[in-house]
Amino acid sequence: MPTDASPLPNESASSPWKAPEPLTVPARALASVPLLVTAKAAAAMCSKSLRTWRSWDAAGWIPQPVRVGRSVLWRTDELRDWIAAGCPRREEWEARK
C-alpha cells in the first residue's frame, strides 16, 4: 500500500481543489416565471389533462385556487410545495399551511 498518497481535496489548504460556487438564478429568469397560472398551465405542470385537473379541483384534491376577477388561478410556488409534500388532499394541505 503506498504511503505517499495525495490528500483528499478537503484535507489540504494548498490543494488546487475548490468548492463549486452555489447555483444562483438570474433575476431575469425569475421574472419570466409566472406567479399565478391558469388551470391549463397548472395541469401541464403536473402532467395531467385539463379535464383531470378540473375534476381534481371539484373533488378537493388540489390546492385551493386564487380568484382574480373572473379568473381562476393557482400559485406556482404553492403547487411546487404541494408536489414536494406528496400531493395531499386539499383539506390536509390547508391544515398544514
Image (cartoon, rainbow, N blue to C red):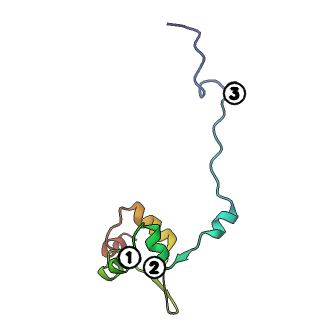
With respect to residue 26, does 22 lie above or below? above
> On the picture, is 81 further left or further right than 5?
left
Question: Residue 38 location, x and y as percent?
Answer: 50, 79
Name the quadrant of the C terminus.
bottom left
* Amino acid type for the residue under numbered disc 3: Pro
Is 13 drawn above or below residue 79 in the view shown?
above
Distance in Å between CA atoms under marks 3 and 1: 52 Å
CA gap between label 2 and label 3 equals 51 Å
How far across and how far down the image is residue 89, in percent?
A: 31, 72
Residue drawn at the location 50% of the way across and 92% of the way down: 70
Q: Which residue is mark 3?
A: 16
Residue shown at the point (64%, 24%) measured from the top left? 12
Three-letter code, disc 1: Trp
Residue 10 sits in which quadrant? top right
- Do the residues under discs 1 and 2 have CB atoms within 8 angstroms? yes
Q: Residue 85, relative to residue 66: is it above or below?
A: above
Determine whether the residue tagged by mark 2 lies in a helix, strand or loop. Answer: helix
Q: Is residue 32 above or below residue 7?
A: below
Do the residues under discs 3 and 1 have CB atoms within 8 angstroms? no
Residue shown at the point (70%, 24%) measured from the top left: 14
> Residue 72 location in percent, x, y?
47, 85
Q: Which residue is mark 1?
A: 53
Tell me which corner region of the image, top left, top right, bottom left or bottom right, holds residue 54: bottom left
